[in-house]
Amino acid sequence: MAYLQKITIIDGLYIFTQQNSKRWYARFKIGKKHITYSTGEYDQETAKIKATDEYYKRRAEHELGIRSGAQKFEDIANEVKEDLNKAIALAKTTGQSTKTKSNYIGILNKYHIPFFTGHRINQIDQSAMDAFSEWRKERFGGEMSSSSLQNHNAVLGKVFEKALKSGQITKYQVPSFDTQGKRQQRRAAFSWEEFRKISDYILDDMHRTKNKKSKMLLELLYDYIDFVVATGMRPGTEVEHVEWRDISFRLNDGVPEITVAVRKGKTTEFTGVRQVVVRSDFIANLEDLVTRFPNRQANEKVFLLANGKDPKSLSRKFSDILAKLNLKKSPYGERTLYSLRHSYITWNLKTKADIASLAKQCGTSIEMIDRTYSHLLPSMFRPEFSGVNYKQREPDSLKRREISQKAKDANIRDYGWLAENFEKRKFI
């Protein structure tokens, strides 16, 4: 190698210039490998400082077992995507949810890879991460929610973890991730009166319509919304993947006891199957569903059209009904099927349900309920704070009441066959 100038800094480390460039380069040996490094500097003294810093940094990394020449961010991110795609393929064979993993891939493609392309993983320091946070905010159009940031941080953590395990960085080189998301906003929900208005409209419309397909959709929607407000389950994946074998039923001294196993949804990947208690009011809907599907099999979905097909427009139909009833808009955003879950939580909080039990029932955390529904907590204790006992009007389905012997006998007469059927077949 022909040098224009060569200056030895210490034994084994020198800087030099070449004919084709006025910048100073550094050359040194780490272990058995010779490394040539561009300081990017024209000034000799500045180049010496940068060359010395790089030499000791590379030597320290070598002593710590860190691989020289760390990969580019996008290469490691693509390896993480491959891992996620394999996990998605496996999840599909076992019937598990793939939504979170698919979201992770989307986040890498839309945010992390576009910004960090060209950066070597060991060069992404805190200043680079801070710059990314500002860029992401601009790309997103504002502050992200805490839950969205958690997803971003989770998949970014997978990239750094892979680099860490392959010896390209140390744990001390992993920068801090942004966790300051937008405070959880109050969620749009229905009052009990509004829910009854929707339910009555669906029932009336079902009796009015002459169209067979519309009638099937309405009768399914009627049971679907009742099920959500009887369980607090998430509309969508959680409800739509309930199978007949997931529902347990018995009459305990004439009182219907219904539970459902949630096997697929937002949190089951982390928490496993969760058991949800169904309000006993749903017993009439359950009987209708059972009657509608006399040849049902244990592993078939419950919430299907009467012809056995998946509903394709349930959410849109519900939205159309809300628009007709002038209930779509609320002070806290547009209402959707998901607003039924928020209604369930809201109603139970107003009747002073135990928050820990409510969180477990709904597959969420106490912290999430506290953040999202904190506006309700003071009103829960109005009598204690005010010193006055207020009469509180509760939704009919949430009233805690002693069931009479007459009602118990009626339940045994009307629903005893369901209990016997479950005992015999081990599914409803």
Image: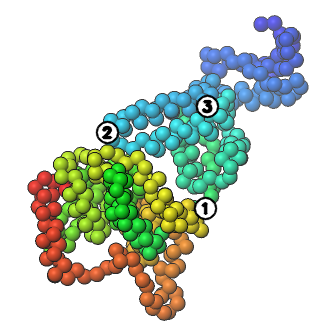
In the image, residue 93 above or below residue 282: above
- Let me know if residue 74 appears in the view: yes
* Labels 3 and 2: the sequence-earlier one: 3
Which colour assignment does the render follow? rainbow
Image coordinates for residue 408, horizontal then vertical, percent: 17, 77
Residue matched to label 1 = 183
Nearer to us: label 3 or label 1:
1
Q: Position of residue 31 (x, y in %)?
A: 61, 19
In this view of the protein, which residue sits in the foreground, 298 or 263?
298
**158 relative to 284 in the view: left or right:** right
Residue under label 2, please give it: 94
Q: Residue at x 63, y 50 (%)?
A: 178
Instruction: Please name the amino acid that badge 3 sits on.
Output: Phe
Q: Amino acid at mark 1?
A: Arg
Rendering quarter of residue 393: bottom left
| SS at badge 3 | helix
The quarter of the displayed image where residue 219 is located: bottom left
User: Residue at left 79%, top 19%?
Assistant: 25
> Which residue is label 3 attached to?
73
Q: Against 135, is 206 above or below?
A: below
Circle nearer the N terminus (3, 1) = 3
Few, some or many residues within 10 Å of mark 2 (<14, 14–19, 20+): few
Query: Which of the image's four quarters has the N terminus?
Result: top right
Residue at x 57% of width, y 40% of height: 107
Three-letter code, disc 2: Thr
